[in-house]
Image (spheres, rainbow, N blue to C red):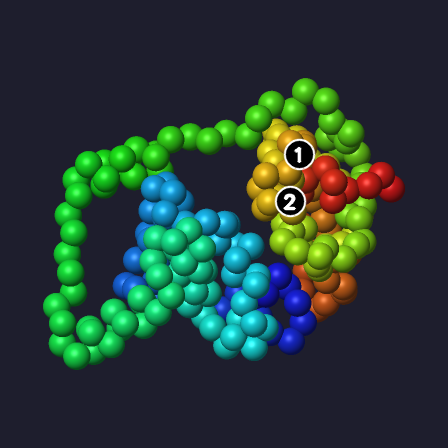
């Protein structure tokens, strides 16, 4: 939940596991294939943020992915409204799960996953390594990759990662901007606690930052 108060500890026993149930990793695979094969419309992360808040909070991590997968397919017209529910009913009635083996698609998808997609080269930047910055305190109307808990906090640029589209527009279709690795002291972000302080590293787009 992005470090927000009231949602329990961020690190819990077993939270280092990639998935807990087999259907969860299949959900992740479906999302990947939707993107590679162009079967859906819209970005999964941005669509998940459209969920009704009550539904979002009740759902598990991969249940949210499952919901966004269906929405992406519906918006592209790959599936029709009610088609998933109809399949669920047929499977409950004992219909055999259909199988589809497509070696060419499997190889195509594996190749796409294996391709490197490095960030672009940042030739001109507003900030440099070692410079103190502040994360702009603002309310984003839609999708953003700027965590709420770090807005207004001061940190230090530790590296220039490269360039990437500003994710807030589109999303991921906005102007190309430098991306920085920024280091924060934990106490500056989350306040003083009984635990020893630690460093928080975030990759943040230039539009999110301002000079101190």
* x and y percentages locating residue 3 in the rendered image: 64, 63
Measured along the vertical axis of the image, is residue 118 above or below residue 203?
Answer: above
Q: What residue is at 49 percent from the left and 69 percent from the top?
A: 12
Measured along the vertical axis of the image, is residue 170 above or below residue 122?
Answer: below
Q: CA distance from mark 1 to mark 2?
A: 8 Å
Q: Is residue 159 left or right of residue 42?
A: right
Q: Which mark is residue 74?
A: none
Q: What residue is at 46 percent from the left and 49 percent from the top?
A: 41
- Which of the 4 quarters of the picture holds residue 7? bottom right
- Which of the 4 quarters of the picture holds residue 148? bottom right
Taking depth in this image into account, of 185 and 111 the one nearest to the observer is: 111
Name the image quarter holding the C terminus: top right
Name the image quarter holding the N terminus: bottom right
Taking depth in this image into account, of 187 and 49 the one nearest to the observer is: 49
Measured along the vertical axis of the image, is residue 93 above or below residue 198?
Answer: below
Q: What residue is at 15 percent from the left and 60 percent from the top?
A: 98
* x and y percentages locating residue 11 in the rendered image: 53, 65
* x and y percentages locating residue 172 in the rendered image: 58, 42
Q: In the rendered image, is residue 152 in sight? A: no
Q: Which residue is mark 1?
A: 175
Taking depth in this image into account, of 75 and 2 the one nearest to the observer is: 75
- Which of the 4 quarters of the picture holds residue 188? bottom right
Q: Which residue is mark 2?
A: 169
Q: In the rendered image, is residue 47 in sight? A: yes
Q: Is residue 70 left or right of residue 105?
A: right
Q: Mark 2 and mark 1 in contact (Cβ < 8 Å)?
A: yes
């Amino acid at each position: 939940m992005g470090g927000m108060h009231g949602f329990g500890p961020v690190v819990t026993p077993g939270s280092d596991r990639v998935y807990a149930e087999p259907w969860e990793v299949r959900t992740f695979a479906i999302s990947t294939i939707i993107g590679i094969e162009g079967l859906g419309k819209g970005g999964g992360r941005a669509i998940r943020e459209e969920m009704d808040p009550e539904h979002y909070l009740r759902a598990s991590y991969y249940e949210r992915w499952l919901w966004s997968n269906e929405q992406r397919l519906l918006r592209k017209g790959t599936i029709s409204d009610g088609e998933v529910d109809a399949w669920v009913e047929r499977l409950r009635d004992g219909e055999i799960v259909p199988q589809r083996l497509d070696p060419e698609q499997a190889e195509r998808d594996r190749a796409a996953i294996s391709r490197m997609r490095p960030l672009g080269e940042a030739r001109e930047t507003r900030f440099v390594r070692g410079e103190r910055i502040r994360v702009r305190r603002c309310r984003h109307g839609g999708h953003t990759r700027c965590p709420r808990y770090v807005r207004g906090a001061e940190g230090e640029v530790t590296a220039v990662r490269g360039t990437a589209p500003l994710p807030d527009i589109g999303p991921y279709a906005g102007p190309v901007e430098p991306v920085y690795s920024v280091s924060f002291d934990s106490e500056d972000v989350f306040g003083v606690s009984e635990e020893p302080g630690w460093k928080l590293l975030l990759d943040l787009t230039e539009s999110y930052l301002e000079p101190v």
